[in-house]
Amino acid sequence: MNRGWIGSAVLFTAIAFLVLRPWEKDPAAGSASALGSVTRVVDGDTIEVRLGGRIEDVRLIGVDTPETVKPGTPVQCFGPRASHFTKGLLTGRRVRLVFGVERRDVYGRLLAYVYLGHRFVNPILVRRGLARSLTIPPNDRFAPRLRRLELDAARSGRGLWGTC
């Protein structure tokens, strides 16, 4: 057997694992993160993301948009606008998910802060009045920031605060 070929195969496999793995440590955020593509927006605060070879439901941490698809719940005021905005922003786009302390909710969805390039999506929704802040410990890293944005949006009558 050719040792050079075996060494090259081992090196290639190691590099492929490091480059292609969907889960990685995010040193800036101090928590695990993943890169994926948004395949569908379920509603304003829930998306489906292709991570590696599987599709995962992802719930945005710290935000709560009005309901549009929850079984047994009527469509809420400003819900369609919030869903439409999130669809336009994220559908088909590559995103980085940064996970909270608690990785999944009771429904099995991944819980994440979502980044589109350098844009932090979660606070964008709150700042525009498309979502309220929602703090559920231990995933409360950005709670003070989201709460301030919510208060500012409410005072300014932006989005749901001026309509609902």
Image (cartoon, grey):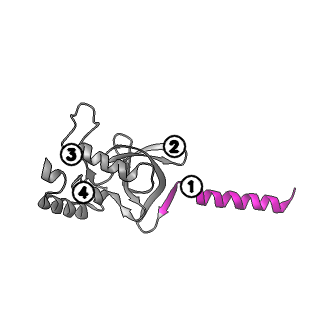
Q: Residue 104: image x %, image y %?
A: 38, 47
Q: Quadrant of residue 97?
A: bottom left
Q: Which mark is residue 78?
A: 3
Upstream in sequence: badge 2 or badge 4:
2
* Rendering coords of residue 47 (x, y %): 38, 46
- Of all residues, the one furthest to the right in this rendering is 1
Q: Is residue 107 above or below residue 10?
A: above
Mark 4 against mark 3, which lies toward the viewer?
A: 3
Q: Which residues are magenta?
A: 1-25
What mark, if any, has residue 126 been given in the picture? 4
Q: CA distance from mark 3 to mark 1?
A: 38 Å
Amino acid type at circle 2 is Arg
Q: Is residue 18 left or right of residue 33?
A: right
Query: Distance between the Cα atoms at labels 4 and 3?
Result: 13 Å
Q: Are marks 1 and 2 in contact (CB under 8 Å)?
A: no
Residue 21, disc = 1
In which quadrant of the rendered view does residue 20 lie?
bottom right
Q: Which residue is mark 2?
A: 54
* 14 up-or-down from 37: above or below: below
**First reached walking from the N terminus: tag 4 or tag 1:** 1
Tell me if residue 54 comes above or below residue 62 in the rendering: above
Amino acid at circle 4 = Val
The spot of residue 5 in percent (x, y) is: 81, 59
Give percent across and percent down for residue 128: 24, 58
Three-letter amino acid code of the residue under disc 1 = Arg
| Image quarter (top left, top right, bottom left or bottom right) of the N terminus | bottom right
> Would you say the magenta stretch is mainly helix, strand or loop?
helix
